[in-house]
Structure formats: structure tokens, C-alpha cells
Amino acid sequence: MTAIIMWLWQVAVVALLNLRTIRQRLGTSAVAIIGIAGVVATFVSVLSMAEGFRKTMASTGSPDTAIVMRSGSDSEMVSILSREDVRIIGDAAGVRRGANGPMASGELFVIVDLPKRSSNTTANVPLRGVSQAAFDVRPNVRIVEGRTFQSGRNELIVGRGAAAQFAGVELGRTIRWGQNEWKVVGIFDAGGTMSDSEIWCDVSVLQPAYRRGSSYQTVYAKLESPEAFTKFKDALTTDPRLSLKVLRETDYFAEQSQMVSTLITTLGSIIAFLMGIGAIFGAVNTMYSAVSSRTREIATLRALGFGGGAVVVSVLAEAVLLGLIGGAVGGAVAYVGFNGFQTSTINWQTFSQVAFAFTVTPGLIGAGLFYALVMGLVGGLLPAVRAARLPIVSALREL
């Protein structure tokens, strides 16, 4: 026990000596801190993009809402349903009934081109044909400017996210797609869900405009309760007239977010790893400089009986401190610069744009600090070993 206390005392003495001399090496220390801060800021900001996209997709789903598509479909784009299919789905067991009848919304999903506000490029934007039932199924959707579209008219309402990201969809504007002109009559807020990235219109107008006859692509059904999903699914999948795929809305959108989130996370991690290598070299140079400037001090301590292990731990402690400072600075830069930043990216499974906000979470900040800690440890390891192996006699002779 006494030996352990003595060793810890030696570590503390040498570490304090190292930390007291940081002011003399502000230039080299700042290089390491800035390098690590840059890596952490990049790492956290890129992953916050994936987190924001995932959060938007995850918040879209509701456990008491089901989505129904043609069997074999992996997205709305490749599904097709008949009017009779939609009627049967609406009458199925487990569907909630409201004042206007079954809360089941047959919908049509097409892609239109709009220019981005942030560049001269165009983007694929989802145009969704819906009926009044869509507002019953999605109670979080509310008109915040103007009014909703009227049945039978070429009128549009635009999600708040789409209105912020794309040009030409301001309230009162007229848009021409193909042979049809549409007027924007309202802006709606869907509470940060994927619907905020969409444009809605009357499905009975969209069908002939895009030569879809009386077909639909999906049905969103509000269920009596989350537990009613099994009853609803069994009623549809066992009906010999139908060939359908039934999913909880939460499961569907979680699956939709997986590809993009994985891609962004993988690319972000690779970029951060490559940048981290450069930051580690910066930390190595900083700690080698620190050891070189204190060669005689370290040799004196060794001559007085301080062990090599205490020297190693003390040098690593300084490297870790510099790493954590850099990590904290990088995390702060990422939070201030990117948290809440609005952008859009393509959902590769529907080939349409999704508007979302970067989300810097405590978990991401913690991951950034851990990465900074690792860079500090790796960067300080070789200089620490060199410091412990300094020949005492020759080191004492150095000027």
C-alpha cells in the first residue's frame, strides 16, 4: 500500500511539473489543440447530420398508424393499389372510425423538380396526393399560413421544411409542371416529421394530371390502438382478394432512414479517422517538444528516485489534457455552428429530398471527447516512453 501511495505521489509531482510549464510551450500546445479540435468538430458535425436525418425519419412514425403497400414493395414509389384495394383496407378490422368515416388515407406519391435556395441545382421533391382523411391520420399536421387546398382544384400546400429549402413555392406563387399549373395556397407544419419535406394536393386532381387513372400507391391507416395492428394486418394478409404488405409506420420509416444514416456515419468516420492521423502526428510533435525542453528536469527527478512509470504517466496526462481541451473546443464549435442547421438530402430509397436539421446530441459530444482522448493517448505514448528511457547521466550534462 505504501509503495502504491509513493508511486501515485511521484506521478502527481511530475504531472504538476509538466502542467506548470505548458505556458512556456503555448505555440506547440496550441497546434495540437487546434488539430484535435478540427477533427472533433468535423466528426461531430458529420454525425449530427446522420442523427438529424434519423431523428426526422423516426419522429414521422406513430405506433398506432399502419402503412399498406403492394406486396413486394420496399417503398411507396414502386407500389400500386386500386381504388377497390383502398376501400377494402379502409373497411378492415382494427381501423379507427371518425366523424368522416374510416381513418384511412389512400395516397399517391410522385416526384417533381424544384430549385434549391442554397444553389443553382434542382432537387427531387415529393408531391403527395391526399384526401381529407390524411389530416385525420396525421393530427400533427396544421396549416400555419394561408389555407388548405380545395377539392377538385389545382392547389398546393407546402411543408415548412420544403418551403425553407426550395425556391418557387412561396405562398401565392403559381408553379407549372408539365401541362398543369398549380397555385400554392398554404404552408403547413408537421412537427419536424418527414411530411414537412413534402408538397400536398388533392389526390383526385393529381391522378389525372399524372395519368394514374384511379390508382393509389399507399394507404395510411390510423388504428384503434397500437395493439390493433396484428388484427388489422391479419385481416388484410389473409384476404384472398388482396396481395399487400402491412407495416407499422414506425418500422417503415426506421427502415427508410437506415441506408442514408449508415452511409453518412461511415463516410464521416472515415474522414475523421484520416484527419485524426494528422492530429496524432501534431500531438506527437508537441509532446516530443515538451520532453526535449524538460530533459534535465526529468533526469534530475529520475536521479532523485522517481520511477520511469511515473514519468510515462505524467507525460500521458499532459497529452490527454491537451486532447480533451481540443475535444471540448471542437465539440463547442460543432454545436454552435451546426446544431439546428437546416438542410436537405436525398433519400435513396424514394429518390426524393428530405428536409431536416443537424442534431448535435450529448452522445455525439461524448463520442467526440472520447476520440480526442484516444488521439491524446496515442500522440503522447512514444514521447512518454522516450522520456522514461532518457539516460540519466547524459541528460544531466545537457545545457
Image (tube, rainbow, N blue to C red):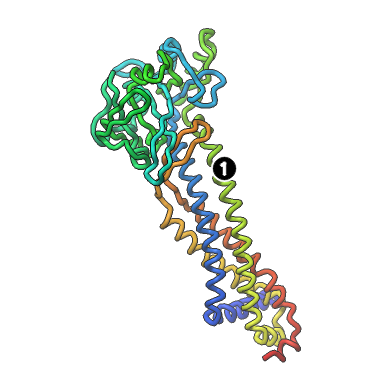
Q: Is residue 88 above or below residue 399?
A: above
Q: Quadrant of residue 183?
A: top left
Residue 103 in view here: no
Task: Give the residue displayed 73% in from the left and 81% down from the top.
Answer: 390
Which residue, as the protein is rendered here, is positioned at the far front? 179
Relative to 266, residue 160 above or below = above
SS assignment at label 1:
helix
Circle 1 Cα neighbour tier, 10 Å, few/some/many (<14 / 14–19 / ≥20) = few
Taking the spot 44% from the left edge, 34% from the top edge, the residue there is: 124
Where is residue 262 shown, x and y percent of the image?
57, 42
Q: Single out the residue that lies furthest toward the top.
A: 241
Q: Is residue 267 above or below residue 388?
A: above
Closer to us: 280 or 328: 280
Residue 340 seen in the figure:
yes
Label 1 belongs to which residue?
Answer: 263
Q: Is residue 344 left or right of residue 8?
A: left
**Which quadrant would residue 116 be assigned to in this image?**
top left
Question: Which quadrant holds the N terminus?
Answer: bottom right
Would residue 140 be found to the left or right of residue 392 on screen?
left
- Residue 316, x across and y down, in percent: 63, 71
Closest to the observer, 113 or 61: 113
x 59%, y 64%: residue:
279
Q: Amino acid at mark 1?
A: Leu
User: Where does the image place residue 82, in percent across and percent down from the top left?
Assistant: 45, 13
Q: Position of residue 331 (x, y in %)?
A: 48, 59
